Image (tube, helix red, strand yellow):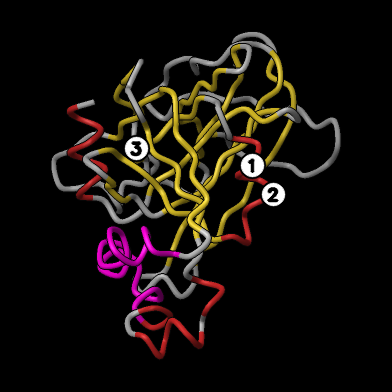
């Protein structure tokens, strides 16, 4: 997982994608490193969603052109994950807090000291998700335009990820959306359930917005 690990450690924003029982899903995350492995520390407000990840596989990706280190391509790595509930926040505070505070400034205000952690007690317990092994790793075109998004597909219980773009993202039920890669290629996703999402943040991360669409992938987009 050499290239993913290097880009992950140096990036400020990333994505975690997987297949839950209801279908593919993805989240914007702060990329952290725990015991030498790429990981994320989800707040417990996302516990219900994170619980659908237990014992499964996930894709860790960095696709936002603004978040990528200079000269690095967008990259994704898929593999088995380990999920741990850090209810006390001891692991998060001891091993991950300073990393997250450097990359995500609101964390320093909420948990940068004992008083802040007592006041914002809900911010410290985390669901830790670590990538155990990169079974598949690939480079992707970066997301550089408002219409670019991460496409999550499902091959059985294993997620697939690519970067796609569209001329419009209609919200009407049943609307057909033609997808293509930003480089003009055909998206690498199997037919079946699909999920597309994108995220953008302000420089101070006080605003970090995400949008998504869910539907069925069919044919060559």
| Direction left: furthest residue | 71
- Give the percent coordinates (x, y) of residue 139: 29, 25
Q: Which residues are magenta?
A: 89-108
- Give the percent coordinates (x, y) of residue 207: 49, 71
Residue at coordinates 13% horizontally, 40% vertically from top-left? 71
Q: Label 3, on which residue? A: 142
Is disc 2 surrounded by few (<14), some (14 to 19) or many (20+) residues within 10 Å?
few
Quarter of the image with the C terminus in it: top right
Q: Label 2, on which residue? A: 48
Q: Label 1, on which residue? A: 51
Residue at coordinates 36% horizontally, 46% vertically from top-left? 64
Could you tell whether 205 is left or right of 170 in the image? left
C-alpha distance separating marks 2 and 3: 30 Å
Residue closer to the observer: 199 or 181: 199
Magenta part mainly helix, strand or loop?
helix
Tell me which numbered mark, 2 or 3, is placed earlier along the sequence: 2
Is 9 magenta? The answer is no
Q: Are marks 2 and 1 in contact (CB under 8 Å)?
A: yes
- Kindly state the secondary structure of the residue where label 3 is placed: loop
- Kindly state the secondary structure of the residue where label 2 is placed: helix
Is 95 magenta? The answer is yes
Q: Nearer the viewer, mark 3 or mark 1?
A: 1
């Amino acid at each position: 997982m050499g290239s993913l690990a290097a880009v992950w450690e140096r990036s400020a924003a990333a994505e975690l994608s997987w297949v839950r029982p209801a279908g593919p899903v993805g989240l914007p995350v702060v990329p952290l490193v725990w015991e030498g492995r790429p990981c994320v520390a989800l707040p417990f407000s996302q516990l219900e969603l994170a619980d659908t990840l237990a014992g499964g596989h996930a894709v860790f990706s960095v696709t936002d052109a603004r978040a990528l280190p200079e000269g690095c391509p967008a990259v994704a790595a898929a593999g088995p994950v380990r999920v741990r509930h850090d209810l006390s926040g001891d692991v998060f505070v001891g091993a991950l807090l300073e990393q997250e505070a450097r990359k995500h400034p609101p964390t320093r205000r909420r948990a940068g000291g004992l008083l802040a952690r007592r006041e914002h007690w809900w911010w410290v317990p985390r669901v830790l998700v670590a990538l155990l092994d990169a079974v598949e790793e690939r480079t992707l075109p970066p997301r550089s335009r408002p219409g670019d998004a991460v496409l999550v597909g499902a091959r059985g219980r294993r997620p697939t990820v690519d970067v796609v773009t569209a001329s419009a993202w209609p919200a009407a039920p049943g609307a057909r959306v033609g997808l293509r890669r930003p480089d003009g290629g055909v998206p690498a996703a199997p037919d079946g359930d699909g999920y597309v999402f994108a995220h953008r943040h302000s420089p101070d991360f006080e605003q970090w917005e995400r949008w998504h669409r869910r539907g069925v992938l069919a044919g060559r987009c």
